[in-house]
Amino acid sequence: MTLALSEYRGASNNTIKHVGLLGAIAECYKQRKQAQYKEYGAALSPYYLSLFAVLESPSSYKGIGFMHLATLLNDCGEFDSAMDVCRKAIEYGLSDGTVTGFEGRVIRIEKAKAKSLK
């Protein structure tokens, strides 16, 4: 993850920055059972969203970063932020590779949020 973050920080090209940040988020996603990874990955969300917004053709990318961030945020109990990430992915026309897509993910996060409030 350190290599991915240094790649992100050192790059002047947004595409290379994206690859680095995506790598760091993916590593946090893999290690999300450990609280520090889960929380750190969730905290990368605003950086990823702002970087993704300035990419040349965002719709040509896959939605894996959004999927990982939505899961990390959901696991941290940040349900509204997780749903916002999904809605942003939908705006870009991205897929998360599942049958229900990001729309289904929003519904599942809403259910998790409702359950947590009980």
Image: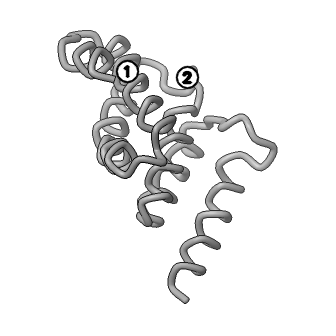
Residue under the image location 41 percent in, 64 percent down: 78
Q: Earlier in the sequence, mark 1 or mark 2?
A: 1
User: At label 2, which amino acid type do we have?
Assistant: Tyr
Quarter of the figure with the C terminus:
bottom right
Residue under numbered circle 2: 61
The kind of secondary structure element at disc 1 is helix
Foreground: 70 or 29? 29
Marks 1 and 2: CB-CB under 8 Å? Answer: yes
For the residue carrying disc 2, how many other residues have a C-alpha within 10 Å: few (<14), some (14-19), or many (20+)? some
Instruction: Look at the numbered disc 2 and give the secondary structure of its residue.
Output: loop
**In the foreground, 57 or 31:** 31
Q: CA distance from mark 1 to mark 2?
A: 10 Å
Q: Is residue 28 above or below residue 15?
A: below
Task: Please say if 95 is above or below 80.
Answer: above
Q: Is residue 96 left or right of residue 27?
A: right
Q: Is the residue 13 above or below the residue 28 in the image? A: above
Q: Is residue 59 left or right of residue 7?
A: right
Kindly identify which numbered label has been placed on residue 31: none
Q: Tell me where residue 34 appears, x and y as whole percent.
A: 41, 47
Q: Position of residue 83 (x, y in %)?
A: 51, 59
Q: Residue extending furthest right?
A: 99
Q: Which mark is residue 18?
A: 1
Residue plotted at (62% across, 60% down)? 106
